[in-house]
Amino acid sequence: MDKRVTFRHRLLPWLLLAPQLAVTALFFLWPAAEAVWQSAFLPDPWGTKAIFVGFDNFTFLFGDPNYRESFAVTAIFSFSVAALSMGLALALAVGADRVIKGSGLYRNLLVWPYAVAPAIAGVLWLFMFNPSIGLVAYYLKALGYNWNHVLHGGEAMTLVVIAAAWKQISYNFLFFLAGLQAIPRSLIEAAAIDGAGAGRRFWTIIFPLLSPTTFFLLVVNVVYAFFDTFGIIHIVTGGGPQRDTTTLVYKVFSDGYEGQDLGSSAAQSVILLVVVGILTVIQFRWVERRVHY
Amino acid sequence: MAGLANNRALAARTGMVEKRGIGRVFTHLGLILGIAVICFPIWVTLVASTVTQQEITHPPLPLIPGSHAWENYSRALGHGIVTPVWRMLLNSTVMALGITVGKIVISLMSAFAIVYFRFPFRMLCFWLIFITLMLPVEVRILPTYEVVANFGMLNTYAGLILPLIASATATFLFRQFFLTVPDELTEAARMDGAGPMRFFWDILLPLSRTNIAALFVILFIYGWNQYLWPLLITTKPEMNTIVMGIKHMMPTGDDFVEWPVVMATAILAMLPPVLVVVLMQRLFVKGLVETEK
């Protein structure tokens, strides 16, 4: 994976690297080190100075039912988003792969939600489900269901999951479609000749052959649900009601920025750093297996 | 790709696997239904941005656009609620372009240095940069905020842009691409007496055009859609970006919300990234699917 032919120069590579290294050091390494450092301190009761407490912030967090709850909320949220969005995207991709006429048009119509900011997606869905003026809430009421996500945790979770999954459908669709189109036609035709019906062909041939794409998307969707959905949650529910939609990332923000508990927020950042690290390693192993230099 | 298309056209003509008649109609119906559901929130938003406040607060909202579009959009753009929307659009444009161009430039340079030079600590630099792949800004928000505050960069464009170009994704992609550029080109250039920078400008950069364009689309959307970071560091309304500024337009609780203006702002916030994706779709899809695989 290294170049055979290279240039020789003593200063030039460093000049070329300087901007990236500077930005990385200033806005990544320094803050990350600071997070680790701060995670070992607690503000004293008068808020004048910080007291060194070692690993106390971490032990406190793991004993804190609120923190464990936000782990559970994050897990439910991420897997619901991934399942809903990937399921719908796969169904649409299978359809678009099957039709010959118009598949380009369908793709055009499905691509653009990718460009919508998560926060704006939150605004749109919040508007539709607004308990007093929302269109969907209105018709749900007409059907006898009183929708109010401001009061009911389950409904709040449903709403943020829908908004987050909606935005991610295009991305999943594009990858599933590419994956489907890479499956050799001859395999499917051979199965058809052997008398396998459409459903059977899908589950015994297409779906297993898609599994690398599915696995890749699963990791990407979980990472997305972890980190990129802050805007949706902040706009739609503000982490509430109570703490029913407070994910780990949201808690870093609300404890640190709104609650001013820097030590705990920093400790949470460090824990998230480990979580991201694990997810990245998984993703990278996948990339390494797939990419051929 | 073209070969595949031919294959499937052939398969379609021979009618081996493709659904005929009623099955095909159902596939189309399913796709159209799916697209209708996905586009519905946008339609509702579009309608809501063209009616009066009264029409919104007395549900159900009509499903045909009203006649107050001019009024709502001009009020949003010229006056807004907290900040005029033209100002937020300007801020978003500066931030998105700053992040996009900044990332592309520093990544091209550092990828060039890492791939085409041998120098001490090369692998250390490589890992220092790539470790930033791991940590999204959402995780290290508070320490990064402090660093930026220490530099006096709150409420500045530099503060909005610089911390977000500390990411390794683009560098990684350019490195991957440079590794596929044949060594013969480098040898030929060297034999003709071209120095490293000459080779970079005259050979490497033109070869990377497609990758740069694809990355441009992806990074522009990334930059435009930032939410949490601008929310933290722009305390002055005139520095708000549109995606986060919309949050300030919707007070929480039962306060009065000027929905038509908010919805017009939502449409304006979606327009630039959606246009970029739709207009540069071929490049974008290629970039997304091929680079992330």
Image: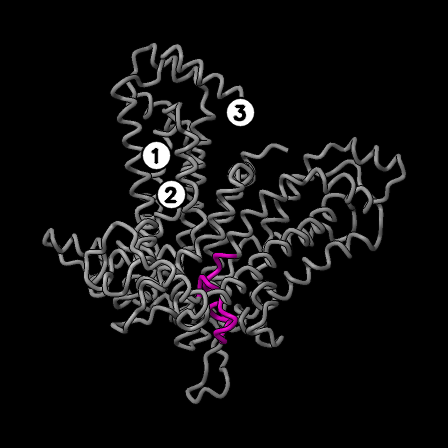
Residue at the spot 65% in from the left edge and 44% down from the top edge: B174
Q: Which residues are drawn in magenta? A: B224-244
User: How far across and how far down the image is residue B66, in percent?
Assistant: 29, 55
The colour scheme is: one colour
Q: Which mark is residue A169?
A: 2
Q: Secondary structure at mark 1?
A: helix
**Closest to the observer: B198 or A224?**
B198
Q: What amino acid does circle 1 point to?
A: Leu
Q: Residue furthest left?
A: A144
Asked whether residue B25 is drawn in magenta, I would say no
Q: Which chain letter matches label 2?
A: A
Quick one: label 3, few (<14), some, or many (20+) residues within 10 Å? few
Q: Which mark is residue A92?
A: 1
- Say if labels 2 and 3 share a chain: no
Q: Is residue A218 left or right of residue B285?
A: left
Quarter of the image with the N terminus of chain A is: top right
Q: What amino acid does circle 2 point to?
A: Ile
User: How far across and how far down the image is residue A154, in percent?
Assistant: 22, 57
Q: Upstream in the sequence, badge 2 or badge 1?
A: 1
Q: Is residue A156 above or below residue A185?
A: below
Residue occupied by mark 3? B1
Residue at the spot 25% in from the left edge and 50% down from the top edge: B63
Asked if the residue at tag 3 contacts the one at tag 1, i.e. Cβ–Cβ closer than 8 Å, the answer is no
